């Protein structure tokens, strides 16, 4: 009997850093499992809801008990008897990566804007449309570069729903401000859209503190529906337009062909969101310094009244639904 390879995913989630690193790590984990790997997620103080999600994906959760993102953290990861380590997060220290680099273990980093402290990983995964080899020219050892939307790591559920080609619910708006929504945009956006009379479906993320507020809005307005996690992807896929935090959610919307309005809430989202806008499947609103619900409402109305067929066509033409499988296949071949 041949022992299967083991992959360790190292990512954290919190109200301050969001849940995106863990979510896309789990997307890759699903694809690695399909490639025959056993997969573990090593994480620090992971919320129970995310632990349950990982388990449902077939990924074993391992709780980190030492100082996160430190050299001790790396040493713990290396004790997991793994064939490959994949690290996702900007906060991992140089000492963390130095420990990995001194080992013989194959490791890859998931990065967005050349913000990683790794200097000589075996592979770099940057799923964003602005990714370029020049961003990693400073790295040593000629790492394998998996760059661009063809490597977008959307979840298996997204890939499956994309294949269904669900019909569009005309005039319906989907709202999701990510797992944390640390700027508290969900409720103000929903309140503003209620004035239009449009049907609204709202997803409140794992670390979003506004669930109770949104629940009250749903009780008050018959055209507002608070959806649960199991309905997230189908609701996104059938929406006329989606209002999303401009992170990995934009790639999920692209995969299912839903036109989107991406709200930039962090500096590291600027380049990728603007590159996505140039590709034609999303509109971008920069909310880092100021936020106006009226601007959001105008963009929604412009999309719905002006037609979204061009945006939908742009999204579907890119064909990113198989990105996680491509990453897993590439890693499996070289690890």
Image: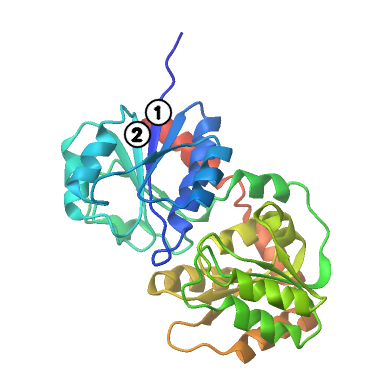
Which element type, helix, strand or loop, lies under badge 1? strand
Residue at 42% x, 74% y is 266
Residue at 68% x, 86% y is 192
Q: Residue 141's quadrant in the figure?
A: top left
Near mark 2 (Cα within 10 A), the count class, few <14, some 14-19 or many ≥20, is: many
Task: Compare marks 1 and 2 and give the one earlier in the sequence.
Answer: 1
Which element type, helix, strand or loop, lies under badge 2? strand
Kindly identify which residue carries mark 2: 84
Q: Residue 220's quadrant in the figure?
A: bottom right
Q: Position of residue 172 (x, y in %)?
A: 78, 72
Q: State the residue lying farthest toward the top.
A: 1
Residue 6: mark in rendering: 1
Tags 1 and 2 touching, CB below 8 Å = yes
Near mark 1 (Cα within 10 A), the count class, few <14, some 14-19 or many ≥20, is: some
Q: Is residue 23 found left or right of 233 in the rendered image? A: left
Residue 140 seen anywhere in this rendered image of the structure: no
Residue at 55% x, 31% y is 34
């Amino acid at each position: 009997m041949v022992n299967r390879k083991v992959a360790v995913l190292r990512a954290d989630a919190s109200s301050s850093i969001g849940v995106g690193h863990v979510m896309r790590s789990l997307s890759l984990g699903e694809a690695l499992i399909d490639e025959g790997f056993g997969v573990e997620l090593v994480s620090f103080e992971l919320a129970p809801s995310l632990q349950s999600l990982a388990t449902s994906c077939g990924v074993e959760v391992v709780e980190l008990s030492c100082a996160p993102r430190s050299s001790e953290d790396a040493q713990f990861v290396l004790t997991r008897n793994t064939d490959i380590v994949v690290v996702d997060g900007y906060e991992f220290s140089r000492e963390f990566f130095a420990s990995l680099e001194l080992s013989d273990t194959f490791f890859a980093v998931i990065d967005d804007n050349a913000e990683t402290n790794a200097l000589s990983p075996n592979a770099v995964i940057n799923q964003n449309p602005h990714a370029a080899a020049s961003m990693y020219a400073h790295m040593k050892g000629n790492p394998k570069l998996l760059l661009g939307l063809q490597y977008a790591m959307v979840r298996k559920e997204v890939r499956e729903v994309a294949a269904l080609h669900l019909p569009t619910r005309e005039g319906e708006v989907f709202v999701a401000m990510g797992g944390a929504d640390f700027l508290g945009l969900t409720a103000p956006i929903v309140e503003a859209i209620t004035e239009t009379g449009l049907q609204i479906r709202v997803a409140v993320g794992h670390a979003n503190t506004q669930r109770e507020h949104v629940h009250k809005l749903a009780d008050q307005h018959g055209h507002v529906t608070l959806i649960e996690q199991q309905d997230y992807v189908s609701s996104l896929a059938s929406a006329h337009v989606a209002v999303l935090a401009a992170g990995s959610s934009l790639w999920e919307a692209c995969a299912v062909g839903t036109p989107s309005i991406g709200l930039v809430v962090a500096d590291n989202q600027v380049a990728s969101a603007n590159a996505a806008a140039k590709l034609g499947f999303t509109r971008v609103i920069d909310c880092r310094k100021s936020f106006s619900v009226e601007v959001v409402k105008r963009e929604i109305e412009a999309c719905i009244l002006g037609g979204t067929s061009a945006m939908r066509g742009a999204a579907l033409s890119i064909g990113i639904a198989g990105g996680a499988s491509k990453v897993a296949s590439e890693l499996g071949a070289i690890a």
